[in-house]
Image (tube, rainbow, N blue to C red):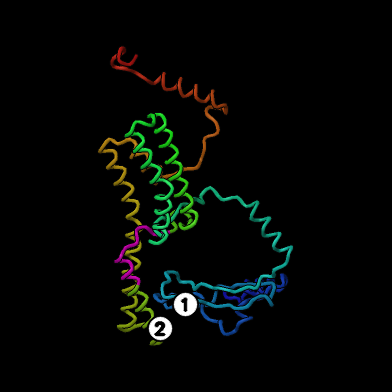
Amino acid sequence: MDLDGNDDIALRLRNFISDCSLTRCDDLFPSQKRHTYVNIALDHCSCIDYMLISAVNDAEHFMVIDPSINFSDHMPLTVDVLIRNSDSFQQGIRKKCKTTKPTSYSLFQLGWEKPTKRRIITTRVCIYTRCCHFVEDIVKSLENGSISVESVSTCIESTSSSVVSVLCSGAKAYVPVCQKEFYKFWWDEELSVLKEASVESDRIWKAVGKPRNGPIFDKRQSCRLLYRKKLRESDQQTNKSYTNDLHEALLKKDGTTFWRCWRSKFECNSNCKQVEGCVDDNNIVNKFVDHFKNIFTCNDENRAA
């Protein structure tokens, strides 16, 4: 909606903003009054996106951004707001952080591809100093016959726990935690080249005054289309890779790999709470037992027994 229009809806919205003691950020920063909706293909442009603020004195900066890569017809808006650092405000923040629970779809994982080589070497040194010398001593003791096999088994468990402990400590110190599928693992060099070409052609187009026709405009549009097409193809390729991985596991009759791949691709957090009206775990188990007994038939009774 164009809030500067004279129609009935614009009038009602302006009255609503006034009644709620709100102020438009573009009125606070007149230099940023510009089109927020731009459709080059249809040759349409207008100002229909706004940000409203109640504490006028807390707005430090407002901007309508015109990024080089933007596949939407709407321009992003940003505002810098000053937050008062009062004790009551901080207590409210802490209280909110303690009571807020992650949603079921907020799955997090470690970004192992992000740590630097130096940090990886640091973790490797920790494992070597804490575990390797210990393992070498155990091997020598076993060869000399001065230690039993049971003791070696205990030492293996202890060493395994030490390695896990070092890796967890290294992950906590050096590996970033991100939401699942935050990084585009399907990104490749071709996408980087197409993105760079799209950004460069958009920069040249803006530098010459954003013409709506001509070779510069055509090149800008073609670079954007190629980049966007490749993005879609790469994103869709992830589903094909899931299918291929599962198919390969089935062909090899590798049940462990198949189910590991299945869980990694199609995780589901929904839990069954009842079966045929029963909520007790033992009753549910017995119902499954009875069900599979009734549907089972064998070719060889002796072998089945």
Magenta stretch encompasses residue 187 = yes
* Kind of residue at badge 2: Lys
Q: Crowdedness of circle 1 by 10 Å Cα count: few (<14), some, many (20+)?
A: few
Looking at the rendering, which quadrant does residue 164 occupy?
Answer: top left
* Relative to 105, 201 lies left or right: left
Asked if residue 228 lies left or right of residue 269, the reply is left
Q: Secondary structure at mark 1?
A: loop
The residue sitting at 39% across, 46% down in the picture is: 133
Disc sitting over residue 206 in the figure: 2
SS label for mark 2: helix
Name the image quarter holding the C terminus: top left
Q: Percent x, y for residue 134? A: 40, 43
Spatial CA span between label 1 and label 2 = 10 Å
- Is 98 contained in the magenta span? no
Check residue 34 in the rendering and tell me which mark sits there, or answer none.
Answer: none
Counting every numbered tag in the picture gives 2
Q: Amino acid at mark 1?
A: Asp
47, 60: nearer the viewer: 60
Q: Position of residue 183 (x, y in %)?
A: 42, 59
Label 1–label 2 contact, CB within 8 A: yes
Kindly give the residue lying farthest to the bottom in the view shown: 208
Camera-side residue of 5 and 144: 144
**Is 166 in front, or is 287?**
166
161 left or right of 99 in image: left
Q: Which residue lies under the disc numbered 1?
A: 66
- The quadrant where residue 42 appears: bottom left
Identify the residue at the far left of this view: 251
Residue positioned 39% across, 21% down in the render:
295
Residue at 48% x, 56% y: name it: 177
The crowding category of the residue bearing disc 2, from other C-alpha atoms within 10 Å (few below 14, some 14 to 19, many at least 20), is some
Q: Residue at x 34, y 18 (%)?
A: 297
The residue range painted magenta reads 183-195
